[in-house]
Amino acid sequence: MSRFLSRATAAMEPYTPGEQPRDAHYIKLNTNESPYPPSPEVIAAIAAFDAGDLRLYPDPAATEFRHVAAGCYSLTPAQVFAGGGSDEVLAYAFMAFFDRGDKVYFPDITYGFYKVYAELFGLKSATIPLKEDFTLNIRDYFGLDGNIFIANPNAPTGICLDASEIEELLRKNPDRLVVVDEAYVDFSNGKSCLRLIDSYDNLLVVQTFSKSRGLAGMRLGLGFGAPELIGGLERIKYSFNPYNIDRVSFAAGVAALKSGEYMREMAGKIIKTRERVREELQKRGFTVLPSEANFLFAKSPYISGGKLYESLKKNGILVRYFDKERLRGFVRVTIGSDEEMDIFLDKLGDIQ
Ligand SMILES: *Cc1c(COP(=O)(O)O)cnc(C)c1O
């Protein structure tokens, strides 16, 4: 490590992204990307983009993108924030709504970035254990003395709360901000809590284009909340990176929002594949958590998660393994195309 690093930088533990190997051709079931391309409208919009326009800065107010997003979800543009991936929206929320030393609550098992951001911004992480079956008891979150981050569906379990449960959480913490990370909500059974935005000024919903819209390579995310909350995120953005979304991404993002039908169709296909793979794994004795996301969190009856990960990798298939308390028996398997999942099941048969 360089001697020029600050003590804080030297001490931090960065997020570990899933592998993006370049050496061999793997079936990639490890980072919850979509097996399907973005919509034809997105591909056409990128192809039609006039690269000469790149000499000009993009619109820092994200006017058109926010307007179209608001239209899709029956909100106003003032209730919408545009980010370069949802990770950026989450980071801005950590910056805007906490002072150093504040407490932030989230489950012991959830998206790893919350802990990383908490540390980066000098907050105290207060983790609340999920129940033995990996479900979340919302009563554990009533009347807390800090803001709350909930991934819904949760990662890496895929387990999802109903919007009515989120609403109860909002009611029991009227003076705390509740951030609901809906990265996977398009694969759930209509469990988005976006409809609560108008009624609760302490709710921030975060969504991404990286999963259901097949645009992980583009970096687009959205935040939804009361105009005052969105104003807070804007203050951070204009103090940090006003041009956070480039012109090509805007063009793609607008086209993606306008092809909601395509997104729902692809999500439907992924859900169908997920249910088929779930049944198949259960037949083979696996424990499979009830996921409403584009992945399954599954535990072999025979071998550890680490061994299964290694064996699958040798067979050309990448899944995600978390070397962490309570998770070592499991692997997280992204739902790919039917063909990819058939190969996965096939190789799995050889390993077991
Ligand atoms: C993938 C993921 C994100 C990050 O999405 P980007 O928009 O690609 O930054 C955020 N939250 C959760 C829970 C995720 O799984």
Image (cartoon, rainbow, N blue to C red):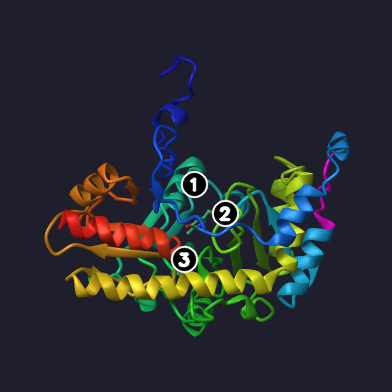
Residue type pointed to by label 3: Ile
**Sequence-wise, which precedes: disc 3 or disc 1?**
1
Q: Which mark is residue 117?
A: 1
Q: Give percent across and percent down for residue 184.
A: 50, 66
Question: Counting residues from the N terminus, which is met first, the one under dot 3 or under dot 2?
Answer: 2
Q: Is mark 2 within 8 Å of ligand 1?
A: yes
**Between residues 177 and 48, which one lies in front from this camera angle?**
48
Determine which quarter of the picture holds residue 67.
bottom right
Q: Residue at x 26, y 60 (%)?
A: 346
Find the distance from the CA under tag 3 to the CA under tag 1: 14 Å
Give the magenta range. 57-63
Does the segment drawn in magenta span residue 60? yes
- For the residues labelled 1 and 2, say whether their Cβ atoms are less than 8 Å apart: yes
Residue furthest top in the image: 3
How far apart marks 1 and 2 lie (CA) works out to 8 Å
In the image, residue 197 sits, relative to residue 183, either above or below, namely below
Residue at image coords 86%, 43%: 50
The image shows residue 224 at horizontal and vertical percentages of: 66, 66
Which residue is tagged 3? 150
Residue annotated with mark 2: 90
